[in-house]
Structures are given as structure tokens and as C-alpha cells.
Image (spheres, rainbow, N blue to C red):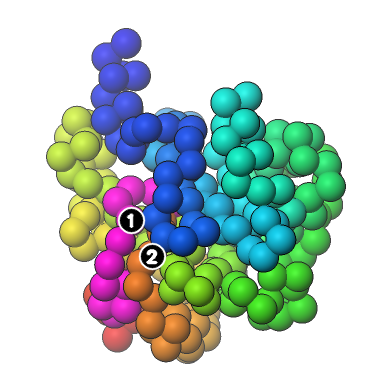
């Protein structure tokens, strides 16, 4: 019970319900998941994003658990048309959403099939290009490729909202009871207010830092108003300044 209570402090209630952040943009804060080596599985709060496009078509980014109450709320927003797995670690609840919305097209970043194994018994469509998607007129797409991790970034043009998953993580220290996790978030460079790319993930881009620099420059050029993150406190304002701060490690 103590561990469950400690983990619940990491989340952002109310959970499993759409919360508006801009016109036609909602977040869904989900439960804690654990990830990492078996001997050191760290708790991560989760977050999905929904963007409503013309025709009440819904873009579902990095989905969280789908329960009956959430389905009812989703129906009030529109019809899920695209379900997005933005990097190899963000796939767990995609099968549940696909089962509930079989007409929705599933798009998966590189590496998900390898990571998911039997959990994901569908191929999906690749997220490898910058364009050619049914949402191009409303949402810009930017794959950021690395040796282990490729994360696909999205930018909602109307609301100037940038969607990231693990390129920036931002854990709030006052939500963390574990001294070990407090230390690891500091060492890893992912502690609020200075959240950034986890140090272990930076290695995946070490072979082609110039490509990552170019991708970050593109995000800065978009001049986002807000940045929604999958893990930790997201940025509801000053998005461009937060990008410049978070990626200063690139030099």
C-alpha cells in the first residue's frame, strides 16, 4: 500500500479523462507504469494527447488505458481516426484502442514491433517520413532518428502545441518520495524545472548529433506555445524557451 501511495503522487489527477489545454486539444493523464532493468524498474506517470481535426476526426497520441467512462467521453469529442505510437516504448495500450476503434488507422514509430513482441499483434503503418499523412494540413510530423530510439514529434499548427514523449522528461521532485528516484532523476537530467533528454537516451543520438540539432532547430522554428510531455510536468507556456533550455546539452 505504501508503494502504491508513493507512486500515486507522481500522477496528475483527475486520471483517465480528457482535460482541455487548447481549442480542440486535450490531454489524458494516466496511471504510473514501471520501466527499466528488472532490478531497477522506475515509476513513470503517463499522458496521452488528443487533437481534433476537421470532421471531428481524432488524432490519439501515445494512448493511455481505455475504460468505459473514457470511451463515453471520447464519443463526445469525435471519432478516433488515427492511433499513434510515437516511439518504441509507447505502445502498451494501442491494442486496446485498436480493438475499440477498428476503423482507426494505427501508425507506429520504428522499433515498436521489435520492442512490443506479442503484445502488439498488428503491423500498423510506418512513421518514417515528414509528410504523406492524412493529417498533414493540420499537424506537422518530424521523425527524430537515433540508433536505438526513433521518436516522431508532432506539432499542431492551429494551437501551436508540440507533442513529445521521451525527448524531454520532467519529473517534479516534490512528487517523488523515493530518495533513490530523486537522485536518479537529478543524475539523469530529467528533474523539473530543468527537465531534458534523459542522459542514457542521449547516447542513441551520439552518432548523428547534427541530425538531432537540425530537428531541434525545426521545433524551435515552429515557435510552440506549449509542449506536452508524456512523463512529468508539461509546459503550458513559453514552449520555444523551454526547447532552447532543454536541448542546450547539444552545444
What percent of the width, then of the height, locates residue 8? Answer: 32, 27
| Percent of width and height locating residue 77 | 60, 46
Q: Is residue 24 magenta?
A: no
The relative height of residue 69 versus residue 115 in the rendered view (above or below) is above
Image position of 13 (left or right of 84): left
Gap between marks 1 and 2, in whole Å? 6 Å
Q: Do residues under tags 1 and 2 come within 8 Å of each other at their CB atoms?
A: yes
Which secondary structure class fits the magenta region best?
loop
Residue 192 as seen in the image, left or right of residue 74: left
Residue in front for this viewpoint, 48 or 244: 48
Q: How many marks?
A: 2
Q: Name the residue: 21% across, 31% down.
A: 178
Q: Is residue 159 above or below residue 60?
A: below
Q: Which mark is residue 234?
A: 1
Q: Secondary structure at mark 1?
A: loop
Q: Residue at position x 48%, y 51% from top?
A: 26
Q: Which residues are magenta?
A: 230-244
138 w.r.t. 101: above or below: below
Q: Is residue 1 visible?
A: yes
| Residue at image coords 60%, 58% | 52
Amino acid at each position: 500500500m505504501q508503494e502504491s501511495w508513493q507512486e500515486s503522487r507522481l500522477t496528475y489527477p483527475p486520471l483517465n479523462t480528457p482535460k482541455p489545454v487548447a481549442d480542440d486539444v486535450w490531454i489524458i493523464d494516466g496511471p504510473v507504469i514501471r520501466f527499466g532493468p528488472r532490478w531497477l524498474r522506475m515509476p513513470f506517470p503517463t499522458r496521452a494527447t488528443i487533437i481534433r481535426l476537421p470532421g471531428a476526426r481524432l488524432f490519439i497520441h501515445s494512448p493511455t488505458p481505455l475504460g468505459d467512462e473514457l470511451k463515453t467521453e471520447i464519443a463526445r469529442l469525435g471519432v478516433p481516426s488515427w492511433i499513434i505510437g510515437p516511439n518504441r516504448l509507447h505502445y502498451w495500450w494501442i491494442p486496446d484502442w485498436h480493438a475499440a476503434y477498428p476503423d482507426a488507422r494505427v501508425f507506429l514509430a520504428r522499433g515498436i514491433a521489435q520492442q512490443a513482441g506479442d503484445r502488439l499483434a498488428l503491423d500498423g503503418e510506418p512513421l518514417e517520413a515528414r509528410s504523406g499523412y492524412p493529417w498533414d494540413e493540420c499537424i506537422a510530423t518530424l521523425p527524430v532518428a537515433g540508433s536505438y530510439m526513433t521518436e516522431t514529434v508532432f506539432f499542431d499548427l492551429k494551437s501551436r502545441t508540440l507533442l513529445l514523449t521521451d525527448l524531454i522528461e520532467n519529473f517534479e521532485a516534490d512528487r517523488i518520495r523515493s530518495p533513490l528516484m530523486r537522485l536518479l532523476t537529478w543524475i539523469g537530467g530529467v528533474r523539473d524545472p530543468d527537465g531534458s533528454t534523459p542522459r542514457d537516451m542521449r547516447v542513441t543520438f551520439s552518432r548523428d548529433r547534427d541530425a538531432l540539432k537540425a530537428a531541434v532547430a525545426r521545433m524551435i522554428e515552429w515557435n510552440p506555445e506549449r509542449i506536452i510531455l508524456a512523463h512529468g510536468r508539461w509546459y503550458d507556456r513559453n514552449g520555444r524557451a523551454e526547447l532552447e533550455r532543454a536541448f542546450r546539452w547539444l552545444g
